[in-house]
Image (spheres, helix red, strand yellow):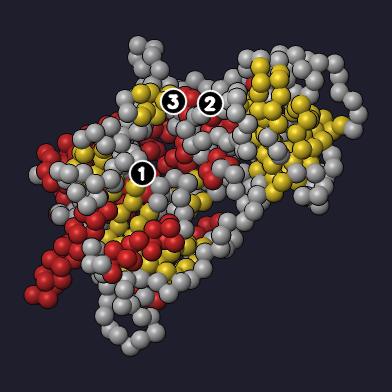
Amino acid sequence: MRPFLSLVLTCCAFAAPGPLRFKITLDSNVAAKTQSGRILVLMSDRLEKQARLAAGFSPTGNWLAAIEVDALKPGRSLEFNPDLQAYPVPLSQAPKGKLQFMALLDPNHSYVRDRQDEGDLYSDVVQLEVDPANTEPIELVLNKRQGARPTLEDTPNIKLVEFESKLLSSFWGRPIHIRAGVVLPPGYDASSNSKKVYPAVYNIHGFGGTHAAAWARGPAVFKEMEEKKRARMVHVYLDASFPTGHHVFADSVNNGPWGKALTEEFVPHIEKRFRVVAKPYGRFVTGHSSGGWTSLWLQVAYPDFFGGTWPTAPDSVDFRSFTGIDATTGSTDNAYRKTDGSTKNLVRSKGKNIASLEEFVKQEEVQGPVGGQMASFDWTFSPRGADGRPMKLFNRETGEQDPFVQKYWERYDIRLILERNWAVLGPKLLGKLHLFCGSEDTFHLEEAFIITCDFLKLKGRENACLLVPGRDHNDLYRPHEAYYPDGLALRIDQEMWAAYEKATVKSKKR
């Protein structure tokens, strides 16, 4: 299914100097078997020597080129033309001078999602005085292997849960697991005869994260519960990562029934294994960025299953501004250009534009065609094409949108779903929506946030949203004197506990 560029295997001398080329050799000391995957060459013009080169989530100052390899044998080499697929421009167009280079072989095509990770083969960084328009092939040897990530192991207060989903396994034709890290509160003893139960907080990470957040954040969360800064609840850190990107726990024709599997299989499994409240009023959901979109989606899609949602800086919740694109049915908005022809910015920091949407997308395309942030949206929201892959919302070269895909995306436009189904959803969601976003979100996500919140205000839900002045995607959780002096995480925790206590009292009166 994946097209491969032809490789020139070599054992002999290269031709006379010409446009920039690379000789990539697989060291037999690190790879005893033939390797396949995606080879990336990174190039930097920084003067100080770098230990490693990398491409970031947002476009960085490094150049990047890629090629697919079908079968590279240990000890063999390939000649790599870095101008065929490159970002931001063909590498031969780089200015002459002292440049640094590094090669990386990504066997499982995960670089676009996880960057350099376990099993990747990579070279030393080579620094040379180069004229990219006229040079002998530059030799890079894949002589290192990225080590394994730390193993996630149970601790007295943090437990690993791996559950094989019958629904997802049936969809994919192979075993698919839902994973989570569960942080237990002080005083919880799974082996005791205690009948005390706790509300559960389901937390979903953003793009590039995993359930390993439980081990990263869990100790601090446990300590805050111990110090009575937080209420004693069970915190379940879900894993929404997948080879196709972030599956957002939404049922999808491409990714499978993740929402159904979560609510019908995994949450019941959690409620059997741990002493948590197996009622809607004891299930809360929160998350940041893509996890923010997920947490709002789950509450809206399953309004009777969860007792409240606290999304923060959610991905676009109104497709009239999908990362700056009007992606609604009938829109002729170009993904890359405004009507006056100017570039659409995607990434900004403190008022300064960092990268356009076109730059972001085209870097992602070089890093890998599957698993990136934009590709992840297509894998979730789009119909399946004739080639078995999801159709793309817009042409990656021109930015032109596909009307058929626009129409299909309507089923994931949260604001549109709310509007069309308010008569039913409005009463079910009363008191359950608590949305937060910075007024200067790094990815302009406040635009869709504001449109959605304006709709909620029209429906009498003035308190459903908080647009935090001056905050962006990365500093939203920092203490804010006016709105959450102890930090947003503790405010959310307090609101969840208040909702639980209120529901508990109401339940006892019935």
Q: Is residue 301 visible?
A: no
Residue on which the image places disc 3: 355
- Cβ atoms under marks 3 and 1 closer than 8 Å: no
As measured in the structure, the alpha-carbon distance from the residue carrying label 3 to the one carrying label 2 is: 11 Å
Q: Nearer the viewer, residue 3 or 209?
A: 209
Indicate the amino acid at tag 2. Gly
Q: Residues within 10 Å of mark 3 (few under 14, many from 20)?
A: many
Query: Which tag is nearer the camera, tag 2 or tag 1?
Result: 2
Quadrant where the C terminus lies?
bottom left
Q: Residues within 10 Å of mark 2 (few under 14, many from 20)?
A: few
**Among all residues in the image, which is located at the extreme right?**
12
As measured in the structure, the alpha-carbon distance from the residue carrying label 3 to the one carrying label 1 is: 18 Å
Residue 249 relative to residue 111: left or right:
left
As measured in the structure, the alpha-carbon distance from the residue carrying label 2 to the one carrying label 1 is: 24 Å
- Element at badge 1? loop
Query: Which tag is nearer the camera, tag 3 or tag 2?
Result: 2
**What is the x, y in percent for residue 106?**
65, 43
> Which quarter of the figure has residue 355?
top left
**What is the x, y in percent for residue 278?**
29, 72
Residue on which the image places disc 2: 61
Q: Residues within 10 Å of mark 1 (few under 14, many from 20)?
A: many
**Among all residues in the image, which is located at the extreme front?**
48
Indicate the amino acid at tag 1. Ser
Indicate the amino acid at tag 3. Ala
Residue on which the image places disc 1: 289
- Element at badge 3? strand
Tell me which label, 3 or 1, sits earlier in the chain: 1
Q: Residue at x 62, y 56 (%)?
A: 148
| Image vertical order of residue 357 relative to residue 453, above or below | above
- Cβ atoms under marks 3 and 2 closer than 8 Å: no
Tell me which label, 3 or 2, sits earlier in the chain: 2
